[in-house]
Image: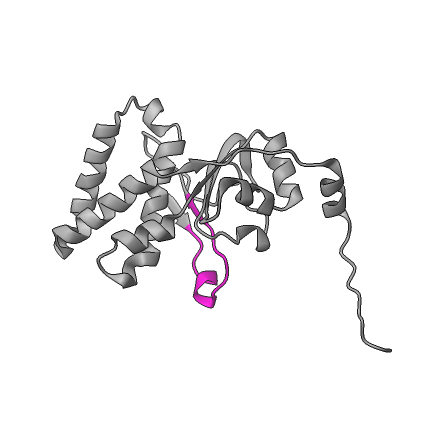
Amino acid sequence: KANPKYGSEKKGQPTNFYATLAPEPIRLNAELKHVNVVLSPDPNVFKNGDALAGLADDGVFVIQSEISPEELWTSFPAEARHAIQGKRIKVYMLDGFKIASEEASDPDLRYRMQGAAFMGAFFAVSSLMEQHDLSEVALFEGIEALMQKKFGGRGERVVQDNVRVIRRGFDEIVEVPIGEVPDFEVAEAALPQIPISLDNP
């Protein structure tokens, strides 16, 4: 089941989308407080809040990035790096926008298809395939069948565009090495921010 938050994105504000996957019917449909995987197609997500809130210990965080894994790690706020270490979170990066830009036959679909790249990343990093003893071949056969059902009316090109984007998201995800976080960085990040005015009184 999926539980999107509508409204804020219409104003250009950050938004959340929750998905619950289970082999049996899901009776509860609500916002999730504890999750195993967080996908962030927004590279600036830490500027808008705590992207790791509710992410379980040993969870997975996937973020959009076009910079190197080492640069990405140092770009995270100190509190986030400290939380990642403490909760043993695995971090991955994916340039989903680049993938969508290269594969979308219609430029207007680039932003939507970035989400498809992150869908591929999800299958690569989650335990879903392992839990259901699902091979990679079977996974992509199922994905193509679903894309055919959803987009078949728009033509085979649209179906294959989506399948290629999901495939590349699955294949091109990169693990980010977890570096050290000096204690002084964490301490500095915890200090209250006091605005200073340089104007004359």
Is 14 covered by the magenta stretch? yes
Determine the residue positioned at 74% across, 36% down: 183
Residue 49's place in the image compared with 22, above or below, is below
Task: Give the residue drawn at x 24%, y 44%.
Answer: 164
| Residue 193 position in % (x across, y down) | 76, 56
Q: Position of residue 47 (x, y in %)?
A: 58, 55
Q: What's drawn in magenta, residue-wise?
A: 4-18
Residue 201: quadrant of the picture = bottom right
Is 6 above or below relative to 162? below
Residue 198 seen in the current view: yes
- Residue 150 located left or right of residue 21: left
Q: Quadrant of residue 87?
A: top right
Relative to residue 51, is residue 188 drawn left or right? right
Asked if residue 141 is among those painted magenta in the image, a careful observer would answer no
Q: Position of 62 compared to 186: left or right?
A: left
- Please tell me which residue is depicted at 55% across the width and 46% down the height of the picture: 51
Depth check, front residue: 41 or 12: 41
Q: How many marks?
A: 0
Viewer-side residue, 72 vs 170 = 72
